[in-house]
Amino acid sequence: MSLEKARFNMIEQQIRPWDVLDFDVLATLKSVPRENFVPNIHRSLAFADIEVPLGHGETMMHPRVEGKVLQELAILPSDTCLEIGTGSGYLTACLAKLSTHVHSVEIHEDLSHIAQNNLDSIGVMNASLMVGDAANDWQTQPNLYNVIAITASMPRYNKRYEKKLAVGGRLFVVVGSENSTQPMQAILVTRVTPSQFLRVSLLEMPLKPLIMQEREEPAFVF
């Protein structure tokens, strides 16, 4: 099967059935070469409906999940984005294509270097990659973002991330634990005013946990 046929099948058989129908999102997923962001040893799995291993126990998200994240964030060309968890840089590239700039932080230095090489290979110029622990004292630049994408789950919702949103900004996160009796939930948070946030539960979505050493806060009820 050709790369383009495999890419077409990924979009039509995995992503569209998840109600990812936004034209700009689908065009982005079609134009960004996902195969360039998959480790060579797993290149044959670039368009498979799996989480592709990246090392350190990290993975690329399912293609359908990546599409859902991009659609729910409703990214505008004028938006500045923050991505927590760069991974191989594929979602970074998609965010960059849809927005004006992306800042992405990755806890593993070697993955960040690989992601930078991957982005350079396709000419992405509007993404800044940083190494750090976003759960602790990592300082974001700028201070506020229009879009925040957290590419791994957290066991409890932590309001520290939504405070990085500009008014009108959107944050996508999956909350919950595989060990819990409650299903993990994808949440979209919108900063309506400087002091008001709208938090909407979207759908059940299992996702690997975010590496973090932050103190647990009391469970937050939506």
Image: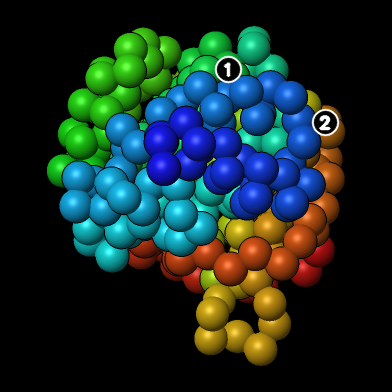
Q: Is 108 on the left-hand or right-hand side of 80?
A: left
Residue at point 33%, 18% (across, down): 122
The quarter holding residue 8 reads: top right
Whether residue 119 is visible to the viewer of this picture, yes or no, is yes
Give the CA distance from mark 1 to mark 2.
22 Å
Disc number placed over residue 193 in the picture, else none? 2
In this rendered view, identify the residue nearer to me: 168 or 104. Answer: 104
Quadrant of the image containing the N terminus: top left
- Measured along the vertical axis of the image, is residue 104 above or below residue 214? above
The residue located at (51%, 22%) in the rendering is 31
Q: Would you place residue 197 above or below residue 115 in this image?
A: below
Tell me the number on the disc at residue 99: 1
Q: Quarter-wise, where is residue 57 in the image?
A: bottom left
Side of 89 where 98 appears, left or right = right
Q: x and y percent of residue 18 in the render? A: 73, 52
Residue 147: image x %, image y %? 62, 30
Q: Quadrant of residue 9?
A: top right
Q: Nearest the camera: 74 or 141?
A: 74
